[in-house]
Amino acid sequence: MKNIIAFCCSVVLVTTSFAQNKDKEKAQELTEKAAKTYVYQANELIEGDNFISAEKEYRKAISKAPSVVAGTYNLGNSYYEKGNFDEALYRHMQAAESATSKSEKHQSYHNMGNILMKENLCKEAVEAYKNALRNDPSDDETRYNLVVAQECAKQQEEDKKQEQEEEKKDENKEDENKDKDKKEDEEKKDNPKDQGDQDKKEGDDQKDEDGKPKDEKDQGKGDEKKDDQEQKGKPKPQPGQLSPQQIKNLLEAMNNQEQKVQEKMNAQKQKGPKVKPEKDW
């Protein structure tokens, strides 16, 4: 009796669990169906060049059922067409993670490689194309893109090495110049006499043969030249004529002579007339 009751309970539990699973599956189907409807509407809006509204519908589909990869994948392609490569890469990464089939994964990784090439990230693009080929080795387009990405990555690596070598050369050259300057400073410090001789030589270059500063000599020449110009500006006396200076000197001499005569006459007046001596017979 107990075994019969236990069996009946097991049947009830299995039936209940089966029914619950059926309900979940049905709910999942409805959810995915709603998400696909959003994707369909978004595709229609994209074809009508209405990106903003299409973006909203794609986001609704992703929020409703992330497992519907078409919403994430198509939104990534829409961002790519608009030149928004960062968002496009993010959405295709989501699509690759959510994808359940190899075909969906291959398409997502392939598009990731294309976006990375647009961003000039060739090394990363190589890995994306390799992942795409792992899910579909027969795709010739992916294989071709992989070769192009590998060549690009190789060239970038060579350019990077060359740039590092140039930077190293510049650093070495800068260090050499510093060492040279340091050595010259030390030599000057060790040989102050040489520096003094150099200063003396520079000072001698500023003097003439007589040891006088060239500036003073030139200044003297300038003064002589100035006097010559002043003399040239004065009128020269004609032959047989007295110059104004000579006339002035002559007048002063005459005045002095007249003064002396006047003083002599005054002296005689004070002494009285001269007395003649008597003759001694």
Image (spheres, helix red, strand yellow):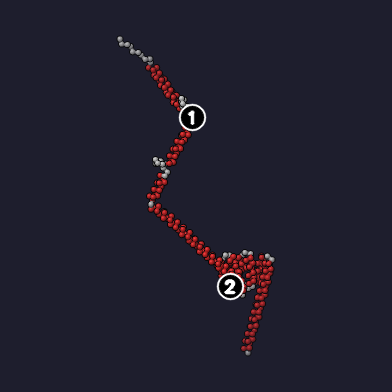
Q: Amino acid at mark 2?
A: Leu
Residue 248 location in percent, x, y? 45, 26
23 sits to left or right of 195: right
Task: Say above or below: 87 vs 21.
Answer: above
Check contact, mark 2 vs mark 1: CB within 8 A.
no
In the image, farthest residue toward the left = 281
Q: Nearer the viewer, residue 230 or 53?
A: 230
Q: Nearer the viewer, residue 272 or 66?
A: 66
Circle 1 sits in a helix, a strand or a loop, which is it? loop
Say which residue label 1 marks.
235
Q: Work out which quarter of the rendered image holds the C terminus and state it.
A: top left
Q: Work out which quarter of the rendered image holds the N terminus and state it.
A: bottom right
Task: Say above or below: 83 vs 201.
Answer: below
The label shown at residue 133 is 2
Q: Nearer the viewer, residue 95 or 104?
A: 104
Residue 80 location in percent, x, y? 62, 66
Residue found at x 44% / y 39%: 218
Q: Is residue 33 visible?
A: yes
Residue found at x 40% / y 52%: 188
Residue found at x 40% / y 49%: 195
